[in-house]
Amino acid sequence: MLHKPYTPQELCVCVEQVLAFQPPPAPPEARKEATSAGEDLDAAFQALRAEYGTRLGEKLRELTAALEQARAGSAEGLEAAYQLAHKLHGTAGSYGFREVSVAARHLETLLKPARSGQGATDWKALDTARDELARVARSTAPRPPPTQDPSATKQKATSAEVEPRGTVLVVDEDATWLAEVERMGKERCVRVITARGVNEAVTAARKQWLDGALLNVDLGGKDGGFAVAERLRAQEALRTLPLAFFGTGGDVTSRLAAILAGASLYLPRPFSAQELTEAVERMSAIRHPEHAKVLVLDDDPEAVRALGHALSSQNVEVVGLGDPYCLVDALAEHRPDLLLLDVEMPGPSGFAMCRIVRSMPEWQGLPILFLTAHTGVEFRVAAFQAGADDYLAKPVLGEELRARVQSRLERARLARERAERDTLTGLLLRRPFLEAARARLAEAQRSGKPLALALLDVDRFKKVNDTYGHMAGDGVLMRMGRLLASHFRKEDLRCRWGGEEFVVALLGESVEGARDILARTAAEMARLEFEGEKGERFQVTFSAGLAVAPRDGTDVDALLRVADERMYRAKARGGNHIES
């Protein structure tokens, strides 16, 4: 595949490769074997799903027992309840129990502040959330498959769902506009809950987990949206719900009022599907902040300890370093999201260390904050000339430190998302993926762990575009991206390689483990049902080639070559196959 603009030399090389490589058509027995392999993958996943479903009742009993211990004052019971809810949230969705996953996430969110001692425990809300979790678990419990009814098998095969980018409540009195927002949400894998007034909005918000709310500023008249925001935030479980406003007026007065009401975003009305997607992803990031790592370089151990105490939380990990000569190795080992540098240290100064970091292409975008007792004009000029983003005067106030660090982390995250993510699928682009994959491989080599890399290609994608339209093709790619985003660990790398090709890298996974993960993903992809531009229903599969370091190579380029060769072999076997 060539990307425009391309040079005449690139065109010649590409044509020569195509003419030189013409794989023979797969023999009938190979096609039959590929079909059998696809059926085996689906059957294996269904068996795993059924087994997991039969254990849901036991898991809920354990959760109820842990909650009762917590109610009696047991910290261990509270921690056990949180961990059980957390595991249900993460695992149930992977096995196709999406509603169970959503209900467990709501319970997990309610347990989090009680677990960290940040507020009084709302037992009424917890009981309601637990009962809702039990209800959806019972309603989705697996039943014996109707093996004699082909139509029932077809229905089951198309019932799989991809975890949405997020769930958002949209409040507006215009039913036509709400229907349009629902359509945009369906198109972009966003779950949209609608309401036409304040009471309807509060009722809807109480029933399910929300990643955020989009409110019309002028709902029912001037300032109506702000009244909805106030009512929502008055609910115990919704006090931290991210809010965004939209309206036809976008002057400073309207935006200021929205900010004062707690908004993190202000959108025009009408907004586009892309603006809806970006708003939901930003609110979801606020609702589920990413784990961040802060590296502190200071020769005073007491200062490092104090900074760690001020910054450490559930979402921020602090790593202390006392020797500036170890900084380069520490960056490679810990891969921090932000660097705090003391200016005056034995040996190289903070200014010199900052210049060293900025000279490394991989770390040129890393937020760097100086810690210093000097805040004069000469210092400030020298700090910014060295490449610092900000500075903090000693003694450092905890609240100011947290505010500045969180602000820098959030801005860096947003900038990284815009620069590194494919807008259609939400996955990494090729360049940032390669950079991260090389770092993961280096980590694997240091720790003696394997690293699995797989190339995935949607089967017969050109036919999808030609038969059902390019919008339908975009829908396939988008849902493939959501599937990869929700079925792998957070530390795994997922990339849209180009066109209909994707790449995943899994640190610490053997050939067998990676193949099992890919098989479950392939089985779920095969069960998804898509809609063409004229309402036609269709399904797709993907093929994958798997390579594992160090068995198949010791650098990323070598692993990619092996995975690419195996992927083409998988496609030559008829598709819907994993070649390892």
Image: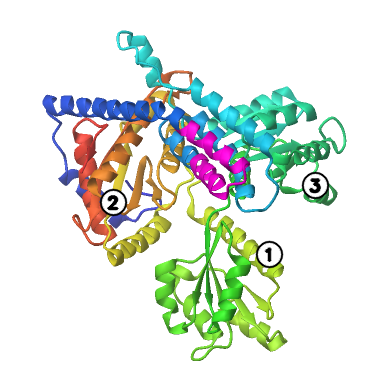
Residue found at x 81% / y 40%: 230
**Residue lying at the far front of the rendered structure:** 72
Label 2, label 3: how far apart the Cα atoms are: 47 Å
Judging by the rendered image, the residue that carries numbered circle 1 is 403
Q: Amino acid at mark 1?
A: Ala
Give the camera-side residue of 202 and 390: 202
Q: Amino acid at mark 2?
A: Ala
* Magenta part, dominant SS: helix
Magenta run includes residue 68? yes
Q: SS of the residue at dot 1?
A: helix
Judging by the rendered image, the residue that carries numbered circle 2 is 452
Q: Is residue 376 left or right of residue 138?
A: right
* Callout 2 touching callout 3 (CB < 8 Å): no
Q: How is the image coloured?
A: rainbow
Q: Please, is residue 207 above or below residue 91 in the view? A: above
Q: Which residues are magenta?
A: 59-86
Q: Amino acid at mark 3?
A: Ala
